[in-house]
Image (cartoon, rainbow, N blue to C red):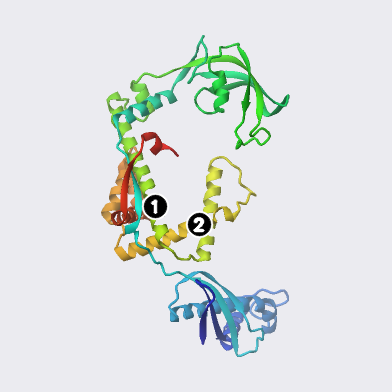
């Protein structure tokens, strides 16, 4: 016999029992099996007395058998009561007497919520739109040239985009502060590698000149000793070098991915790459807008077990990302509470998407998957090999299917809601 009681909105407690005779029978069988191969000092293999086998292995074997019996009993009760369990149950054995007829236990667990998705037809969603212009292509090529610039010493005052080498000393209350002194330090003016006031002070200086000036650090500056405080810098310019942009020739074309150096293909290649990136970023922005609308109209609790799992997954992904950026994370624990809100949001969205996909048949079609894989492959030298790699790798192909599924959901939401198109600039779209 078993019964299920409601503890809270999603928590349930199963109260049930297991015949101890079945546990005793299974324990005897398992100890007999162990005894056939057990090696215990003073006894020949297979000749160890049953009581000795029980002394050495009985407690552990019983623990394993009880654990297996609890899980079987729990699974049967879940089927009988038609429960959708979220996460693993926490068992509590109530019977202490090993000779009792029944082993009574309880299991505390969570169930999946009833996912109720509200009406999005009354929601207004801002849909981001953008049309790639020739000026965007030209500006991108200009940026590529700047990135490949060489520098030549200039006998003039420093100006933006110049590379200068400086010595500097910064003092707070007359004392040099930590990190406030350097010699032969390279600065590319206008790059933002240094604070704007510091770079602005260098503009107009020539090699060999020295200048002192006061500067106030931002309140949120990472150096706590000087954050929000006024310091005095003394700068000496050692050299000024002006950028020399490369010509748009075969060598330049090869440097930006045109294998044969054909300059005529440069514009087409840049436009194609930009269009793919624009498309990707528009999808991300509009997906976020659609998901926020779904979250707003859908009010239900999410299982803590699923949130805990998602939080742990986010922590692991964050650690991997930080290690990939060169940070040493060994021995460093990230606080779970930093990821709780995000974890709750991801779990809730996952449940919402599952409900919408099943209810409105929004699964990705084979044609959609093939089109997206083909689109991804175009940015590689051998697209056909990339397509084959995706289709030979089920987990990777599943990722593509999930992206198409999300796009289908976004299309459904946009079709239901009131959408307002908002055009943005190229710079705004490309911001991180």
Secondary structure under the numbered disc 1 in the rendered image: helix
Crowding at dot 2, Cα within 10 Å, few <14 / some 14-19 / many 20+, comes out as: many
Furthest residue toward bottom? 101
- Alpha-carbon distance for marks 1 and 2? 23 Å
As drawn, the residue found furthest toward the left would be: 367
* 41, 21: nearer the viewer: 21
Q: Is residue 208 above or below residue 25?
A: above
Q: Tell me the SS state at disc 2.
A: helix
Q: Using residue 288 as the reference point, say whether residue 3 is left or right of it.
A: right
Q: Is residue 385 visible to the viewer in this orientation of the structure?
A: no
Q: Residue at x 28, y 52 (%)?
A: 368
Lower position in the chain sequence, tag 1 or tag 2: 2
Residue 61 % position (x, y): 62, 77
Q: Determine the residue positioned at 50% across, 11% down.
A: 154
Quadrant of image for the C terminus: top left
Image check: 160 left or right of 266?
right
Percent x, y for residue 140? 37, 29
Relative placement, left or right, of 23 versus 118 is right
Q: Is residue 362 above or below residue 278?
A: below
Residue picked out by circle 1: 396
The picture places residue 248, in percent across and down from the top left corner, at 34, 21
Q: Which mark is residue 343?
A: 2
Q: Nearer the viewer, residue 173 or 195?
A: 173
**Foreground pick, 368 / 347:** 347
- What is the x, y in percent for residue 81? 45, 80
């Amino acid at each position: 016999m078993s019964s299920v009681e409601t503890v809270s909105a999603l928590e349930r407690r199963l109260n049930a029992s297991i015949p101890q005779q079945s546990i005793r029978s299974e324990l005897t069988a398992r100890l007999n099996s162990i005894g056939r191969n057990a090696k215990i000092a003073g006894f020949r293999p297979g000749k160890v007395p049953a009581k000795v086998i029980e002394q050495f292995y009985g407690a552990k074997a019983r623990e394993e058998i009880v654990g297996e019996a609890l899980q079987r009993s729990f699974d049967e009760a879940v089927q009988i009561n038609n429960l959708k369990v979220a996460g693993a149950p926490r068992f509590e054995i109530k019977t202490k007497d090993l000779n009792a007829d029944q082993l009574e236990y309880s299991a505390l667990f969570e169930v999946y919520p009833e996912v109720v998705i509200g009406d999005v037809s009354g929601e207004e969603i801002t849909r981001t739109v953008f049309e790639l212009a020739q000026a965007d292509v030209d500006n991108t090529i200009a940026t590529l040239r700047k990135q490949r610039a060489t520098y030549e010493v200039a006998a003039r005052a420093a100006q933006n985009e110049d590379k200068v080498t400086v010595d500097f000393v910064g003092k707070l209350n007359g004392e040099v502060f930590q990190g406030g002194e350097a010699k032969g330090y390279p600065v590319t003016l206008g790059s933002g590698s240094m604070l704007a006031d510091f770079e602005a002070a260098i503009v107009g200086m020539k090699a060999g000149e020295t200048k002192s000036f006061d500067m106030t650090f931002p309140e949120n500056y990472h150096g706590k000793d000087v954050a929000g405080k006024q310091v005095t810098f003394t700068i000496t310019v050692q050299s000024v070098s002006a950028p020399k942009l490369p010509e748009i020739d075969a060598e330049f074309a090869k440097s930006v991915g045109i294998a044969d150096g054909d300059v005529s293909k440069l514009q087409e290649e840049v436009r194609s790459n930009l269009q793919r990136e624009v498309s990707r970023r528009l999808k991300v922005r509009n997906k976020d807008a659609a998901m926020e609308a779904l979250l707003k109209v859908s009010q239900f609790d999410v299982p803590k077990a699923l949130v805990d799992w998602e939080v742990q997954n986010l922590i692991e992904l964050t650690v991997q990302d930080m290690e990939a950026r060169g940070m040493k994370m060994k021995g460093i624990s990230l606080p779970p509470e930093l990821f709780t809100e995000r974890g709750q949001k991801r779990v809730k969205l996952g449940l919402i998407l599952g409900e919408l996909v099943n209810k409105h048949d929004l699964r990705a079609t084979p044609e959609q998957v093939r089109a997206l894989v083909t689109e991804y492959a175009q940015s590689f030298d051998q697209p056909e090999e990339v397509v084959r790699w995706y289709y030979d790798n089920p987990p990777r192909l599943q990722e593509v299917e999930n992206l198409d599924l999300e796009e289908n959901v976004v299309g459904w939401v946009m079709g239901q809601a009131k959408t307002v198109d908002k055009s943005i600039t190229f710079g705004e779209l490309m911001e991180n």
